[in-house]
Amino acid sequence: MSGFDNFNTDFYQSSYSVDDQSQGGYGYSNSENPYNKPYGQYDYSQPMGYSAPGMMQPQQPYTGQIFQPTQTYNPSTPQSMYSNSFDDEPPLLEELGINFDHIWQKTLTVLHPLKAADGSIMNETDLAGPMVFCLAFGATLLLSGKIQFGYVYGISAIGCLAMYCLLNLMSMTGVSFGCVASVLGYCLLPMILLSSFGVLFSLQGMMGIILTATIIGWCSFSASKIFISALAMDGQQLLVAYPCALLYGVFALISVF
């Protein structure tokens, strides 16, 4: 045991002794350190910590009933913001600008050249019908062995741009590019009939020439009638029909040759 005591004391040399425990640590004396007081002599009535104002709020007693929460929000209006149903929403096709009733009326106006055109309907920017008619025209040319989709869309774009500039110079009110494209696209419908005849018969004979001239006059007359009605250009139908006839003549050449 004496050897073990010597080994324990020689293992780590330190100046610390048990008697130092009675002294205050970190610069506190026994009189200043409140934790060095014996048991039973400490004054528990004094607060030991500091609490910031507003951190600890006094708890309010719960006055409601269990499983029945109190109503904390009372809206001023009887209907909430989520009370509206989808029944009040407009149809999706109407939001996209696709109106089948107006499309049908425009189609009938083109098919019936002597029918009066409704200017309020014709002044709309509707491109659903023209896109379908352009695809149908290209499909009938494809049945004849003519892959001309690029020419159809290219000539349509150039023709719409030229007519847009011309009509803005001739009319007092002006016209939008979408309206011009819509009218010219709808009036392409008789040209689909010509290309459909070209699938079954040859259009390079005398009957083909007469039929082609009739279709060109039909398309140009319908387009000029709609433009005159929509833009209030009374007495200028022949002036508008001439550039329209040039445009549809190019489509007729694609159908014949």
Image (tube, rainbow, N blue to C red):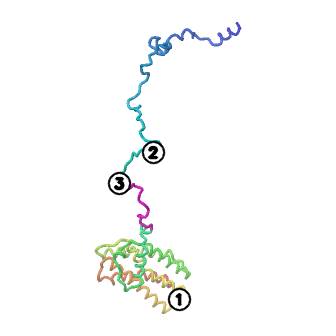
Q: Crowding at label 1, few (<14), some or many (≥20) Cα neighbours within 10 Å?
A: few
Q: Name the magenta segment's main secondary structure.
A: loop
Rendered view: 96 above or below 7: below
- State which tag comes first along the sequence, 2 or 1: 2
Where, by quadrant of the figure, is residue 142 drawn? bottom right
Q: Residue at coordinates 43% horizontally, 81% vertically from top-left?
A: 248
Judging by the rendered image, the residue that carries numbered circle 3 is 77
The residue identified by callout 2 is 68
Tell me where residue 46 appears, x and y as whole percent: 42, 19
Residue 164 on image: x %, y % = 36, 74
In the drawing, what numbered circle is on residue 202?
A: 1
Question: How far apart, in angstroms, are the residues tagged by discs 3 and 1?
Answer: 73 Å
Front one among 116 and 209:
116
| Structural distance between the alpha carbons of marks 3 and 2 | 23 Å
Q: Quadrant of residue 12?
A: top right
Task: Identify the secondary structure beneath mark 1.
Answer: loop
Can residue 43 be found in the magenta stretch? no
Q: Does the CB distance between marks 3 and 2 fall below 8 Å?
A: no
- Side of 177 where 16 appears, left or right: right
Task: Please state which amino acid type lies under the numbered disc 3.
Answer: Thr
Front position in the image: 196 or 162: 196
Label 3 vs 1, first from the N-terminus: 3
The magenta span reads 76-92
